[in-house]
Image (spheres, rainbow, N blue to C red):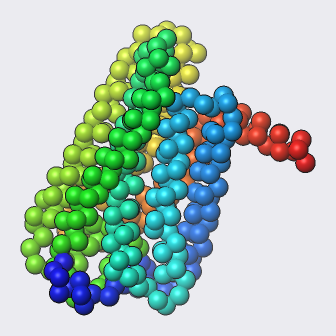
Amino acid sequence: MSEADNNSFKGFILMGVSDHPKLEMIFFFVILFFYLLTLVGNLTIILISRLDARLHTPMYFFLSNLSSLDLAFTTSSVPQMLLNLWGPDKTISYSGCITQLYVFLWLGATEGILLVVMAFDRYVAVCRPLHYMTIMHPRLCWQLAAIAWLGGLGNSLIQSTFTVQLPLCGHQKVDNFLCEVPALIKIACGDTTLNEAVLNGVCAFFTAVPLSIILISYGFIAQAVLKNRSTDGWQKAFKTCGSHLIVVFLFYISAIYAYLLPAKSSSQDRGKFISLFYSVVTPMVNPLIYTLRNKEVKGALRRFLGKRREEQ
């Protein structure tokens, strides 16, 4: 945006489902319910990972990072979303929208890199079990987590800065539930070819490279599992890796649809509901996937609840 735009621009209107007013209250209560489940589920994983000594392992260190990330990710957009759905005021300030843009993209990109780190952790656990604790020592775990967070920040600084510089020509209505790159490109006036090229290039890199590393890691894992003729070994590997693969699938399918399709040619209705899916549904589903499919987490929960009952 030009300097003149910044001086006169007061804010944006997040349209959401305002063209269907009867749906707004339904969306409000559904999103609020999902948000509360997200808070409870992710806080539970963080809490039991800290309190249960049996979960003081690299896998649960990264899982705690993922839960912290999901908490911040959903909180960066959902409260404003609920506020806009509750009443007639759909506005968000210019500074609020830009802050949401940077933070939302930062946390989303960080999750993509963190899923790669978790895939590497699973590769070492399955393919190098005898050296697992030697390789995945605490210092390396902290370094890998830092790479994920800083890599996501770098991605956000590139994409968001290019987007902020777009001329809007007074357009304020954002046909989405939140401020994100594809939605703002859609309301830009003038030639956005360069912005879309940068968006697609950076997104392709931050999608293709991490996803390729994940698939290669699981290729080695599958190879190691097939060499092991023990049924118990197969089941253990599947339980160890299955939850992570489901989370990877949910994250990358929605990210590819939202960010790699041409911003001005894709269906806006489908685009904003995909945004709703990965900003509200995925952060809620992640802890459910890991708790329902993981005996260690369920065991830690039972021990934690048992202690609470004894204290009472």
Which residue is painted at 83% across and 45% down in the image? 308
Q: Residue 81's spot in the image, x, y percent?
A: 48, 74
Which residue is painted at 19% across and 65% down in the image? 162
Seen in the image, is 234 located left or right of residue 278?
right
- Decide: is 76 above or below 303: below
- Decide: is 109 above or below 134: below
Please state which of residues 231 and 210 is positioned toward the viewer in this rendering: 210
Which residue is painted at 60% across and 45% down in the image? 46
Which residue is painted at 39% across and 72% down in the image? 178
Question: In this view of the protein, can residue 167 be seen by the observer?
Answer: yes
Question: In this view of the protein, can residue 269 be seen by the observer?
Answer: no
Q: Residue 220's spot in the image, x, y percent?
A: 35, 20
Q: Residue 257's spot in the image, x, y percent?
A: 30, 56
- Decide: is 289 above or below 99: above
Seen in the image, is 55 located left or right of residue 70?
right
Please state which of residues 258 and 78 is positioned toward the viewer in this rendering: 78
Q: Residue 54's spot in the image, x, y percent?
A: 66, 28
